[in-house]
Image: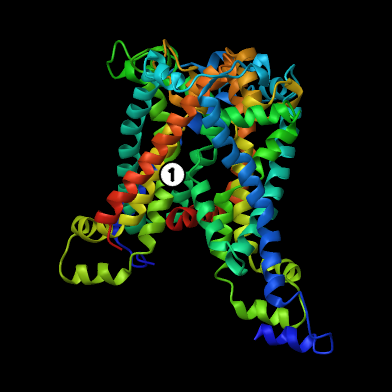
Amino acid sequence: MTNRKFKPGNLIFTTLFALLSVFFLMPLVWMLSAASKTEKDVWTFPIQWIPKDWNLIANFKAVWMGDVAFGLFYMNSLKIALISTIATIVISAMAGYALGKLNFKGRSLIFTLMLAFMMIPEQATLVPRYIMIKELGLYDSHASLILMGMFSSYFTFLLRQFMIGIHNDMLEAAELDGAGFFRIFWSVVLPLSRPILATVGIIKFIWTWNDYQGPLIMLNSTKLYTIPLGMQFFKEEFGTQISVMMMASVAAILPLLILFLALQKQVIDGIAIGGVKG
Amino acid sequence: MSESAVTRKTAGAPTKIYWTRKRREQLAGWLFIAPEVIGMLVIAVFPLLFSLFLSLTEWNLVGGLSAIHFVGLDNFIELFRDNRFLLALKNNVLFTIGTVPVTMLLGVVLSALIHKKLYAKTFFKVAFFVPYICSTVAIAAVWQALYHPSKGPINQILMQIGLSEPPRWLVDTSFSLVAIMIIYVWQLLGYQIIIFLAGMTNIPEELYEAATIDGASGIGQFRRITLPLLGPTTFFLAITSTISSFKIFDMIKFLTDGGPNYSSTVIVYQIYEEGFERFKMGYASAMSWVLFLIIMLVTSITWMTQNRKVHY
């Protein structure tokens, strides 16, 4: 809005920033280039940004068709991230609706507690949660990760903030038509909250996909590994084959990168809302 | 008005209705909130209290629940004699001092420039934000290669510009923590920029227009308008960044396992090592509580200073 008029100074700044961001993204460009090279070309200096000998297919095969079941890790990550994301959306949307739109005794107390829950760091409760999972017989299962990832006071807070802004007239009109509270939630509040639900869904999906600590503690069998844990396994198996390792990194990042570039507005706005109001 | 809707609808029914609208709303409220509240009790509140109990015991997980021995404050006393833990604590503090001010300063300057001086703002937002959405483990793998002591591009460049003995980064006791701090700043900067930009968008444009008429320079406007009005944003970022710097774990576990010689160990890594490698559940829980108390302390100190210094 502020930069409608052409200003030469701004053009200079934009050019400088373009250079700065190229420099900033260099590690990721290096990753892409190393993933398509032969092992010996990875280390040549000055850096060969565009490979002389393309080795993309061989590296791809080493990641996807080698001894490490990368495809399986992919499916595991996808399964855990999808289920936890859907569960989080449902649970947090219900709670957000109750806290934002329903009057019940104890609501403000619960809301205060909710804000306090946000201050309990996950890392401080690792030990007891691990013991609980063991006692429940859920150790070394995907259920343990899903169960631990379903509840989020942060997302509940975001959804409440959004839902509180929905006009009461709409809810009252639905009520006059004979809708009960569940019906109002399902047919009025949820459809109106679509943008924030999308935002919460993408952010939660990205976080779960990238989670390393949870699987590291809750999983043991290789066949249950998720991608970040699989990367660690890769490092131990192929630590010296950097080109293969970089190909695996590309595979870990690429789906999220595509998702993010397609929906960057939702992700960035969501992070910004959480940051400014939270 | 909705009250009357219910009355109208049920006008023909017997006069005493138990499920009045108010009662139904009470019930609905509790039913809708129940899953989240139960979940929070099970995965946050109970574990926190359970860990407080465990911190007062000595328990090697292998012996089963019956092998728990109550030891009072022994674990806490031992913690402050444990050199590894003290080093972890020191490293965490250094990590915070070395990353939070740097990212915040870079973040505020870069976002002010993006906000005021650049075309194609969205492009730059996205470019700086990309590392934040990338899996920490995947980017750690990339940086590990970049940091390779003799063959890595970073040291190749440093040698090119005349540094004959560049740092050995991740395998060097005096550089391992710094090496991780650099990756961390790189990954977090985009997040800071997004939050600062959101804060700047909320500053009314008229203030800048008035200042321009008064002849204030760009830098003057930044100092007198942008910075003061970003108070709440800065405060939010100061708390959350400090807290997240105390939770650092993924990079450390993947890149150095706290080494070499514990030079990059941190509290969460120590919790992991004592709890999940040595199975000393009581001791690890005591560390968890120290972490929790530090985070509470940071939050409350920042709250108290905020009330005095930040003007909305």
Above/below status of B37 relative to B64: below
Closer to the camera, A112 or B120? A112
- Rendered residue at 38%/12% (across/down): B172
Residue A246 x %, y %: 58, 24
Residue type at mark 1 is Gly
| Residue B142 in view, yes or no | no
Q: Quadrant of the N terminus of chain B?
A: bottom right
In the picture, measured across the screen, residue B61 lies left or right of residue B11, that is: left
Question: Badge 1 local density, few (<14 within 10 Å), some, or many (20+)?
Answer: many
| Residue B134 in view, yes or no | yes
Closer to the camera, B107 or A107? A107
Q: Quadrant of the C terminus of chain B?
A: bottom left
Circle 1 sits on which residue?
B190
Closer to the camera, A14 or A211? A211
In the picture, measured across the screen, residue A138 lies left or right of residue B304, that is: right
In the picture, measured across the screen, residue A59 lies left or right of residue B248, that is: right
